[in-house]
Image: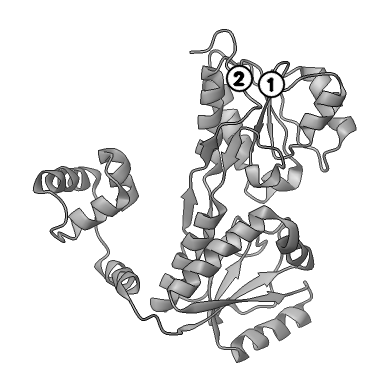
Amino acid sequence: MASIRTISKETKFSVATVSEALRNTGRVKEETRQIILEAAERLGYQRNRFIGDVMSRMRRSQAVQFRGTLAVLESESFHRARDYSRWHKDLFKGATDRADELGFKIEFFQFNTSKRSLSHLQHVLYARGVEGVFLPPFLHSWNFEGIDWSCFSAVQLDYGLENVRMHTVMPDHHPSMINALKRLEGMGYRRPGLFVEHFQDDRILMKWLAGYTAFENRSTRCNCLPVFEPQELNKGNFLDWFYGNRPDVVLGHRGDVIDWLEEEGLSVPGDVGFFSLNLHHTDRETAGFDLLPRQLGAVAIEVLISQIHLQQKGVPQIPQTTSLEAKWVDGFSLKAKAGAD
């Protein structure tokens, strides 16, 4: 089904303008409104009035009163990551700010994987009046078999659960990868190489790999090199892969590969380009993707609170995924090459 964002992309008007036109608020020029209405009809858009009214009331609320507590379930490693990871800090900044705006507060609850511990956690959440559960992007998948999800609304970032699938909010990895490779191709790069640690791609159902493979199958100018997907990346195995394939640009999460290449006497971007798949995991100001963690956190909270208002609890029969395409950011690690468009 077409969405407001679909119409926005089709008409080149902002999401806000499309929403105003569809609701006939009078704040959009009639000529613009007719263009939007024609596109909506052509695309088969149908407004869910109930959800729209709920979200409108939430946005219009001026004096926000406290409405409830949202729980973030976190592993011990994730708890530590919140102290030093820019990604996690921005993610929860966006989530906390949006929750505050809508009258909710966020609390963090640690867990371990034993059924007894999870059963106890469920009782704690229930006793604290928690209605919504936020499942952050874990490094590895977890089994929450001890929790009765029928007591809660829930949203997950990435696919972090082994046994169930909740409504999900995540970066749109597949088209983001394809678009990045197209842009690199336009800059004259012809031998791209992707390296990604196994857990990074496994928890998103290999979407980075899928986008890379899709581009490889369609590109007539690039020779996409074999993907390097180690269990754990280190200097030795990275350089073995690099010298065995000789990419002219590498794509991955780890910015320390630039140091490894420079220690080998290679210059970035002179000898090889580098593109970060997540700039929040890269210390240097390289070219790469901003995966928009603050926006992801805010959207996840909106999805979760809308479920609470609609009394949607438990494992959904048809899980939905809301995805945000990554933002390309320029940096020193890329330069146009001979043959650039």
Residue 130 drawn above or below residue 276 = below
Residue 33 appears at what percent x and percent y?
14, 48
Which label was assigned to residue 269? 1
Q: Secondary structure at mark 2?
A: loop
Q: Is residue 247 left or right of residue 334?
A: right
Q: Residue furthest right?
A: 236
Q: Find residue 83 and report its image quarter.
A: bottom right
Q: Tell me if residue 3 can be seen.
A: no
Q: Nearer the viewer, residue 277 or 222?
A: 277
Q: Residue at x 56, y 23 (%)?
A: 184
Amino acid type, callout 1: Pro
Q: Residue furthest left?
A: 30
Mark 2 → mark 1, Cα distance in angstroms: 6 Å
Residue 71 drawn above or below residue 334 = below
Q: Secondary structure at mark 1?
A: loop
Q: Is residue 116 left or right of residue 34?
A: right
Amino acid type, callout 2: Lys
Residue 100 drawn above or below residue 249 = below
The answer to whether marks 2 and 1 mark residues whose Cβ atoms lie closer than 8 Å is: yes
Which label was assigned to residue 335? 2
Residue 256 appears at what percent x and percent y?
79, 36
Q: Nearer the viewer, residue 235 or 122?
A: 235
Q: Residue at x 25, y 56 (%)?
A: 19
